[in-house]
Amino acid sequence: MALFEEYVGRCSEPVENPVERVAVRRFAEAIGDPNPVYTDPEAARRSVHGGLIAPPTFPRTFEYGSVPGAELPLEGLIHGGHNTVYERPLYVGESVVCRVELKRSFDREGRSGRLGFLVFERTGETPEGERIFTSDDTVVVTEQVRERLAR
């Protein structure tokens, strides 16, 4: 049986995240993106977006909760991939309701043992239910981490 296979299809409780101007500015500075649509209200107002928006990778800072029963350790995991699709920009000042769902679990044999692959879908919506973005994240769990989880 694949790691956490019994939890596939389960979803976290919703978590509300504010998109705060200072946090967006600091994030843009941290990633070295000088685009004024993230930091300059006047430039953003004149842009196609009509206001300040967050950089595309900003949702990585959000809380999504966790899939009940499928909690992972904070260390020893391998990042297997990440992809985000937007329905529209993420605006400064709005609130985003986020969830995470375990979409898929499978195993593969690696050089150092069995690897578990967990594919999570993270979503962000307005409080009214309008989808803003969907992210797919793949986490690779080594055999050593699996052994710790089994204890």
Image (cartoon, rainbow, N blue to C red):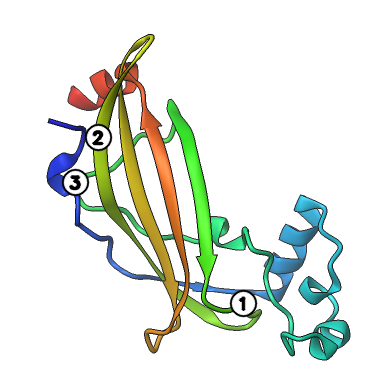
Element marked by disc 3: loop
Snapshot quadrant of residue 77: top left
Mark 1, secondary structure of its residue: loop
Query: What percent of the width, then of the height, locates residue 13?
Result: 28, 66
Amino acid found under the numbered disc labelled 3: Gly
Q: Which mark is residue 106?
A: 2
Residue occupied by mark 3? 69
Is the C-beta separation of discs 3 and 1 under 8 Å?
Answer: no
46 above or below 107? Answer: below
Name which residue type carries label 2. Phe
**Quadrant of the rendered structure where residue 106 is?**
top left
Q: Residue at x 84, y 90 (%)?
A: 46
Q: Is residue 31 left or right of residue 65?
A: right
In the figure, is residue 56 to the left or right of 48?
left
Going 35% across and 22% down the picture, which residue do you hit? 142
Q: Residues within 10 Å of mark 2 (few under 14, many from 20)?
A: some
Q: Residue at x 39, y 31 (%)?
A: 140
Q: Earlier in the sequence, mark 1 or mark 2?
A: 1
Q: Residue at x 41, y 66 (%)?
A: 123
Of labels 3 and 1, earlier in sequence is 3
Query: Residue 89's mark?
Result: 1
